Amino acid sequence: MFKLKTKSGAKKRFKFIVNGKIKRKKSFKNHLLTKKENKRKRRLSYFSRVHKSDIKNIKKQLLLN
């Protein structure tokens, strides 16, 4: 039988925090930043939690069933 590998994209994008929750980076902070306000860019730099309906799929990609 072949080896099961984790999805490398999911491995780079998600980190686990306490209580089995998963954190992720927010989008829209890669380019075209000159027209965005400083307040908006600052809020986009914080981490966010993954919604509970997506946790099952992410754990499946990371082979953590």
Image (cartoon, helix red, strand yellow):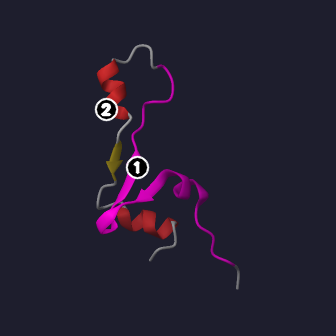
Residue that extends furthest to the right in the rendered view of this protein:
2
Amino acid under label 2?
Arg
Q: Residue at x 34, y 54 (%)?
A: 50
Q: In which quarter of the image is the N terminus?
A: bottom right
Secondary structure of the residue carrying numbered label 1? strand
Estimate the spatial distance between the alpha carbons at disc 2 and disc 1, rounded to whole Å. 13 Å
Q: Residue 3 carries which label?
A: none
Q: Position of residue 35 (x, y in %)?
A: 40, 14
Residue 28 lies in quadrant = top left
- 10 Å neighbourhood of mark 2: few (<14), some, or many (≥20)? few
Contact? badges 2 and 1 (CB < 8 Å)? no
Amino acid under label 1?
Arg
- In the image, the segment drawn in magenta is 3-32
Q: Name the residue under label 1.
A: 24
From what the image shows, is residue 28 above or below residue 57? above
Q: Quadrant of the C terminus?
A: bottom left
Q: Mark 2 points at which residue?
A: 43
Judge whether residue 23 is colored magenta: yes
Q: Residue at x 63, y 70 (%)?
A: 5
- 10 Å neighbourhood of mark 1: few (<14), some, or many (≥20)? some
Secondary structure of the residue carrying numbered label 2? helix
Q: Residue at x 31, y 25 (%)?
A: 40
Q: Position of residue 42 (x, y in %)?
A: 34, 28
From what the image shows, is residue 48 above or below residue 53? above
Question: Does residue 44 appear left or right of residue 14 in this picture?
Answer: left
Q: Position of residue 56 (x, y in %)?
A: 38, 68
